[in-house]
Amino acid sequence: MSFISFTKFFLKGLQRNFKIIRYGDVPEIYNSTAVLERYSFATPGVTGYLLSIREIGRHLLRKGLKFYKMPNSPFIYCGGSSNNEREFYFFSHLMKDFLSANGYRRDENLSFVDTKMIRKTGFEYIVSVYLFILCLLYLFRIKLGPVSLKYLVAYVKIFLSLYVSTRRQGIGKRVLVVANDHTDFPVVSSMIMQYWGNPVVYVQHAEVSYLFPPLDFDVSVLRNQKTLDVYREIGKITGDSYIIPRQEVTECLYSIFEVISEDCHVVIYLSSVFDYYYLKVCIDELKKNERIASVGVKPHPRIDRGFLNSLEEVIVYDSIPSFKHVALVPNSSVVIELLELGNPVFQYFELDNIGRDYYGFVKEEITPEVSLNHLSQPFWELEFYDEGWLSKFSAYSPSVNESWRKDLARLVCKMKSYM
């Protein structure tokens, strides 16, 4: 074991993990009630630091740890959300078409492999103590609070477990595929694979913001040019980047220019931190609109769906409806997918607690913004989606033209070199 390399990758991952929460100056979106209550003792001051140190030690200095059974496959995936898995299916289909690789399976995903509790060896306990010391030092580099402590504890636990799991089983030559560049498990798996000298492929699952860490994977499969521009502003890009559309644009896109002459269907798309009060207000206002045939809600995959039982005369959709509809969206990267499908999107930011125009779609004139008093009127008749809009949208949807095929050929050559 190289302690210098080990330390470098441990701290590099922490940096990525903590950038998204501003090193403890936490954006409101990450202040969940469960975390604030669970780690309420993590406050600045002597008592808060002592209790936080005890909490870290409780997890790291125990005799047992979680052990992951490593998949026996040339491709290993890491990411448990449905959005992550969607990208894994996309990537594996590309590899299947061009490299005769297997399609994605859950038994190749570290988020779903078998685990068990094992007893640490003497060496592994020394590693635990070393990581405990690194965590103590890092505590004084961040702003201590419930969310930052939770992030630190989760990260170091996974790092230790994954390091021990790969060391005991031997990792060999594998390619890791992740679809998230800043949450604990994908970040840790990336760091561990890089420590063992294996390549990591990042397949972007959603639009990015300037809070994200720099792009520094061996291979990055991005969704559009706008993403690459944002990453360039964030910092130096390392590795190779390829812009590949998730689906080829069909004639559906161009139906967005059609005038909606008859009563329309409206679907509200919720982010993971939606505001229940404003959702009810929004629905009530839409019901006043005589031109609306139906109102539906498409909840975010991470939302507790129990609240849906209280919504009257509202259709709940498990996925994006296949029929043409008007989409009302707060802050969510689903905007791009909806537009590609030819559904006009209007953004109503009161629906969540993230703030106005987090992804910058309104600023970039990709979507129009509406307010509450618009909703009882036929707001979709706004003259916004036209040929001028299409040229702007090409930065977010590379399949508007054929230039992306060159990147696909380059990506295939790169992956062949790994195989």
Image (tube, rainbow, N blue to C red):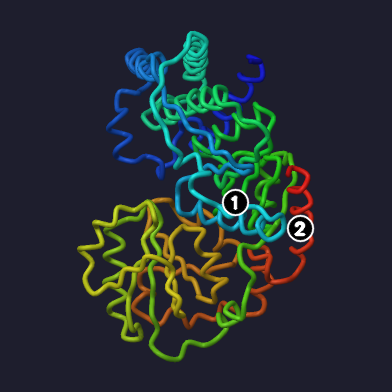
For residue 391, which numbered disc appears in the image?
Answer: none
The x, y position of residue 99, in whole percent, is 71, 54
Residue drawn at x 32%, y 80% as measured from the top left = 294
Mark 1 and mark 2 in contact? Answer it, CB < 8 Å: no
**What is the total number of numbered labels drawn onto the structure image?**
2
- For the residues labelled 1 and 2, the Cα–Cα distance comes to 15 Å
In this picture, is 235 found above or below 311? above
Residue drawn at x 66%, y 46% as measured from the top left = 231
The x, y position of residue 410, in whole percent, is 79, 54
Three-letter residue code for mark 2: Asp
Looking at the picture, tell me which residue is in the foreground, 321 or 110.
110
Looking at the picture, tell me which residue is in the foreground, 121 or 163.
121
Which quadrant is home to the C terminus? top right
Secondary element at image label 1 = loop
The x, y position of residue 343, in whole percent, is 50, 75
The x, y position of residue 162, in whole percent, is 51, 28
Which quadrant is home to the N terminus? top right
Q: Earlier in the sequence, mark 1 or mark 2?
A: 1
Residue drawn at x 61%, y 67% as measured from the top left = 247
Q: Residues within 10 Å of mark 1 (few under 14, many from 20)?
A: many
For residue 407, which numbered disc appears in the image?
Answer: 2
Residue drawn at x 59%, y 77% as measured from the top left = 253
In this picture, is 124 found above or below 320? above
Looking at the picture, tell me which residue is in the foreground, 140 or 241.
241
Secondary element at image label 2 = helix
In this picture, is 38 found above or below 418? above
Q: Which residue is mark 1?
A: 204
Q: Is residue 377 left or right of residue 398?
A: left
Three-letter residue code for mark 1: Gln
Q: Residues within 10 Å of mark 2 (few under 14, many from 20)?
A: some
